[in-house]
Amino acid sequence: MAAQLSAPEQAAASKSHGGLGGSYEVTVYELENFQGKRCELSAECPNLTDSLLEKVGSIQVESGPWLAFVCRAFRGEQFVLEKRDYPCWDAWSSSRRHNDILLSLRPLHIDIPDHKLYLFESPAFSGRKMEIMDDDVPSLWAHGFQDCVASAHAITGTWVGYEFPGYRGSQYMFERGEYCRWNEWDANQPQLQSVCLIRDQKWHKWGCFLSS
């Protein structure tokens, strides 16, 4: 059985964080399979273990999406959490590195209805360029682009890049803005092999891929 919410948890849950598509709600549990002490959030939390929980074992996203981080203050490896149940670490991680620590969490705002992302093979938006519009790319190689991505420009939309093809490996978030080097999306090297668009379910249209 889940424990009753403590005073700090109730305070966290009472915060409103409205955004495009409505409110954000997530319940975080200390143990796997939604057991143990829980914390309900509707706004960003820079430190889940600061008087809230000792650890994170499972997550239920009632409305979202959310972005989770392995370090405090929204730093370190990232995991996108869409509306669904995550009974254990393996359910939210696509990384080969087993890291069952989550220390901070924030709502992920969706920029709709149009989506466009530019990927560049060299830093500072130079070298070959790939333009992605309104859709997912399970393999950059399949569309004639290499796996070396050293800079990016998210014109519109909210995107998540993956270290390996098929949406596997470490995840990197691209919200609207410029990323001059790979360290600006918290990557250790300029390797990116698949890209997924974070959608509001009210909007969707097939996109295209252009390289130059």
Image (cartoon, rainbow, N blue to C red):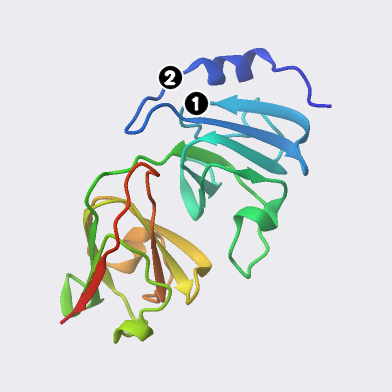
Q: Is residue 56 visible?
A: no
Is residue 25 shown above or below 185? Answer: above
- Where's residue 120, x and y in %? 23, 74
Q: Secondary structure at mark 1?
A: loop
121 to 36, vertically: above or below = below
Q: CA distance from mark 2 to mark 1?
A: 6 Å
Q: Which mark is residue 42?
A: 1
Circle 2/circle 1 CB separation < 8 Å: yes
Residue 183 in the figure: left or right of residue 36: left
- Residue drawn at x 60%, y 34% is 48
Q: Residue at x 27, y 51 (%)?
A: 157
Please report the residue visible at 47 percent of the width from the left and 77 percent of the height from the top: 165
Number of marks drawn: 2
User: Which numbered disc, 2 or 1, marks the residue that appears first in the sequence?
Assistant: 2
How far from the left and from the top, in percent, is residue 117? 24, 62
Mark 2 residue type: Ser
Q: Quadrant of residue 205?
A: bottom left
Q: Is residue 206 visible?
A: yes
| Residue occupied by mark 2 | 16
Side of 133 where 212 appears, left or right: left
Q: What amino acid type is highlighted by mark number 1?
A: Ser
Q: Quadrant of the N terminus?
A: top right
85 vs 126, nearest the viewer: 85
